[in-house]
Image (cartoon, helix red, strand yellow):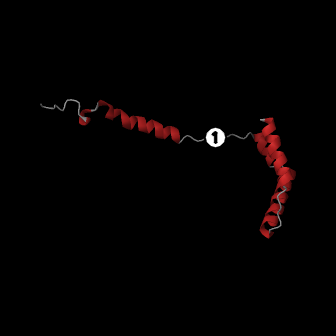
Amino acid sequence: MRINHFNSIQNNPYTKQVPHMKDNHVKAAYKKDEIQISDEAKKLLSSSKFEQDRTNKVNEIKQQVDSGTYKVNVSKTAASIIQYYKQG
């Protein structure tokens, strides 16, 4: 019995489509999310009172963490988590 190489792997018509499909998949994987902040929101964020209060709070927490005196209020954290899941 003779075996012909009529449908061998070398003559696969679908091999030309594979690189094209891979390129589309790779391009879709690299899409990035974008956000746009309006000018009004930027003005609100840069207001001196908000920015100063935030800076003071962050510096205070950093000092507590560095000195090892920062304590987590577990009851407030648990209540916040429970409240979050009750809303959703």
On screen, 45 above or below 7?
below
- Disc 1 marks a residue whose amino acid type is Glu
Residue furthest out toward the left: 1
Relative depth, front residue between 43 and 73: 73
Q: Quadrant of residue 37?
A: top right
Relative depth, front residue between 41 and 9: 9
Horizontal and vertical percent for residue 64? 82, 65
In the picture provided, is 1 more to the left or to the right than 25?
left
User: In the rendered picture of this protein, how many numbered marks are placed on residues?
Assistant: 1
Horizontal and vertical percent for residue 32? 58, 42
Judged from the image, the secondary structure of the residue bearing numbered disc 1 is loop
Give the residue displayed 85% in from the left and 59% down from the top: 56
Horizontal and vertical percent for residue 48? 85, 52
Horizontal and vertical percent for residue 55? 82, 57
Mark 1 = which residue?
34
Give the residue displayed 23% in from the left and 30% down from the top: 7
Relative depth, front residue between 42 and 17: 17
Q: Quadrant of residue 52?
A: bottom right
